[in-house]
Image: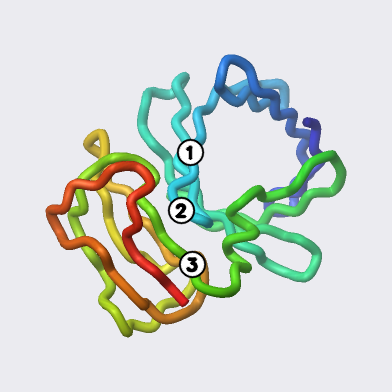
Amino acid sequence: MELQIDIGGRTRTVIVETKDGQYHVTSDGETWLADAAVVDGATYSLILPGTGYTSHEVGVAAAGPHGDLSVHLASGITTVRRLSGAGRFGGRGVQAAQAVGTQQVVAPMPGKVVRVLVKPGDQVKARQGLVVVEAMKMENELRSPKDGRIVDVFITEGTSVEAGRLLVVVE
């Protein structure tokens, strides 16, 4: 898939290919390998093997009437707009950021709950932290996919969870 995108006012050509279960992302003549996993409805965990095996959390949310995305990185927030190219832009994160109805937040990987940040009845905003799960010596904050109210919290701090376990329900 080849895309023309505007990142913070600069146009770039980005080519994304999948090989051997990894993404090969080429931009400005340089190619990076990446492993990606969905953490919650609007957050991805990226590992770039060429730069070590540190997980980078990337949040994605809709950011305007033209399909712009607000991409939240450790270094700051960048607005991205697709100028041309095939494929759905933004993936599941964008859909979840605009989610309606009751949403279930599940553990994306096995780990241990180290913090529960909400309780039933709390009002939350989209992308607000709900639970922190430690996996592979990294803490991953799972965030709300929408504005809403916490209906149920099914875990406590110290709980070991398997991938797919229901953690929190937001309506």
Q: Quadrant of the N terminus?
A: top right
Q: Is residue 67 left or right of residue 110?
A: right
Quarter of the figure with residue 4: top right
Label 2 to label 1, Cα distance in Å?
Answer: 9 Å
Look at the numbered discs 3 and 2 and tell me whether their residues touch, using CB distance below 8 Å.
no
Residue drawn at x 47%, y 79% as measured from the top left: 148
Which residue does the numbered mark 3 point to in the structure image? 103
The residue at which mark 2 appears reads as 40
The tally of labels here is 3
Name the amino acid type tagged 2.
Asp
Residue 37 image label: 1
Q: Is residue 133 left or right of residue 19?
A: left
Crowding near pointer 3: few (<14 within 10 Å), some, many (20+)? some
Disc 3 to disc 2, how far (Cα)?
11 Å
| SS type, badge 1 | strand
Residue at image point 35% right, 57% down: 166
Q: Nearer the viewer, mark 3 or mark 2?
A: 3
> Label 3 amino acid?
Gln
* Residue ranking furthest to the left: 158
Q: Nearer the viewer, residue 70 or 45?
A: 45
Please rate how many residues cluster around mark 2, counting C-alpha atoms within 10 Å: few if below 14, some from 14 to 19, many from 20.
Answer: many
Name the amino acid, label 1: Ala
Secondary-structure class at tag 2: strand
Find residue 83 and report its horizontal and vertical position in percent.
84, 48
Q: Is residue 36 above or below residue 98?
A: above
Mark in the foreground, 3 or 1: 3
**First of labels 3, 2 by sequence position:** 2
Q: Would you place residue 144 above or below residue 72 in this image?
A: below
For the view shown, which residue lies furthest in the top direction?
Answer: 20
Q: Quadrant of residue 79?
A: bottom right
Contact check, label 2 and label 1, Cβ < 8 Å: no
